[in-house]
């Protein structure tokens, strides 16, 4: 609501009349005019569409949100991700574009929000960053706790402090788009592995969860798929934002191929057990 309000109160600064009669004229001339600023990369519609997937790639395609959804009592709770993404991200980005245009197209989130709504705008940007980071820090805490054995609150606090300090430097927050894209790519193959195990293996007659069944602490096939998919994705001669889709399909196919022989091995094990 703060982002929407900020965009509405900013429109008069751009010359939009109270009756919105010239809104589209101003929007195409001053806001979404298709002209990239100096030092900025020009994005077309496909860039925006694929990045809209990419910004949530780690959560949805990479299945990182499963760390939170494991507490869900119904499968339909997964729809809340879509509600948040469409109403939250899309509206927030549209409104941000309006506010950025009003401050001379300078990519400065704090200044953008403060110029529009004062302290309320600055607080909204801080809270938006904090609430967005919360589930990621929680997942990071779970992962690091597994490795270190430290209490979850302590490892999450450390990860949060390190992230907070790094986020103060332009070197990091001005490269956020590329960082999010690479972050999503890194997690994408693991999501493909989980999807293949859960949905594809039963339909192909491949036994599921063999690493757990055989009490293995290391699954070399998953490592091979993860590394191979990333190499494949980064070698593709296309824009970074477009690489996740062929990389995801590659990871699915690769993992299935690596496990096709397991059907025969399990049948042999079962015959041995019977004998």
Image (cartoon, rainbow, N blue to C red):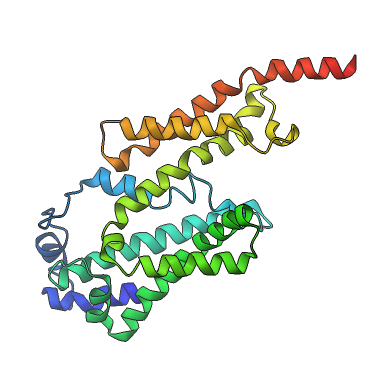
Which quarter of the picture shows residue 67?
A: bottom right
Q: Residue at x 66, y 28 (%)?
A: 202
Q: Is residue 77 visible?
A: no
Q: Is residue 26 left or right of residue 98?
A: left
Residue 26 in the image, given as x and y percentages of width and height: 11, 66
In front of the other: 242 or 222: 222
Residue 232 visible? The answer is: yes
Which picture quadrant has residue 104? bottom left
Looking at the rendering, which quadrant does residue 256 occupy?
Answer: top right
Where is residue 199? Give x, y as percent: 61, 34
Residue 259 position, x and y percent, is: 61, 23
Q: Residue at x 70, y 15 (%)?
A: 264
Name the residue located 15 percent from the left edge and 73 percent from the top edge.
Answer: 103
**Is residue 71 or residue 275 the one in the foreground?**
275
Residue shown at the point (41%, 35%) measured from the top left: 230
Question: Quarter holding the N terminus?
Answer: bottom left
Q: Is residue 197 above or below residue 122?
A: above
Residue 118 sits above or below residue 169 on the image: below
Position of 90 with respect to 191 (left or right) is left
């Amino acid at each position: 609501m703060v982002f929407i309000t900020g965009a509405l109160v900013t429109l008069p600064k751009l010359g939009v009349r109270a009756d919105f009669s010239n809104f589209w004229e101003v929007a195409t001339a001053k806001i979404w005019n298709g002209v990239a600023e100096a030092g900025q990369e020009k994005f077309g519609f496909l860039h925006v569409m694929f990045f809209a997937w990419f910004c949530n790639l780690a959560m949805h395609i990479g299945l990182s949100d499963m760390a939170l959804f494991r507490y869900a009592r119904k499968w339909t709770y997964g729809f809340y991700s879509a509600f948040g993404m469409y109403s939250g991200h899309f509206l927030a980005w549209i409104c941000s574009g309006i506010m950025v245009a009003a401050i001379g197209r300078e990519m400065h989130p704090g200044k953008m929000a403060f110029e529009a709504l004062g302290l309320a705008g600055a607080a909204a940007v801080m809270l938006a960053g904090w609430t967005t980071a919360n589930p990621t820090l929680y997942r990071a805490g779970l992962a690091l706790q597994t490795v270190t054995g430290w209490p979850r609150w302590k490892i999450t606090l450390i990860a949060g402090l390190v992230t907070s300090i790094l986020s103060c430097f332009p070197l990091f927050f001005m490269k956020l788009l590329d960082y999010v894209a690479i972050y999503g790519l890194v997690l994408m193959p693991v999501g493909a592995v989980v999807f293949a195990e859960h949905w594809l293996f039963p339909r192909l007659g491949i036994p599921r969860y063999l690493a757990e069944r055989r009490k293995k602490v290391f699954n070399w096939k998953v490592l091979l798929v993860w590394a191979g998919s990333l190499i494949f994705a980064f070698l593709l001669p296309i824009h970074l934002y477009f690489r996740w889709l062929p990389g995801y399909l590659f990871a699915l196919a690769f993992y299935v191929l690596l496990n096709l022989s397991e059907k025969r091995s399990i049948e042999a094990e079962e015959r041995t057990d019977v004998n």
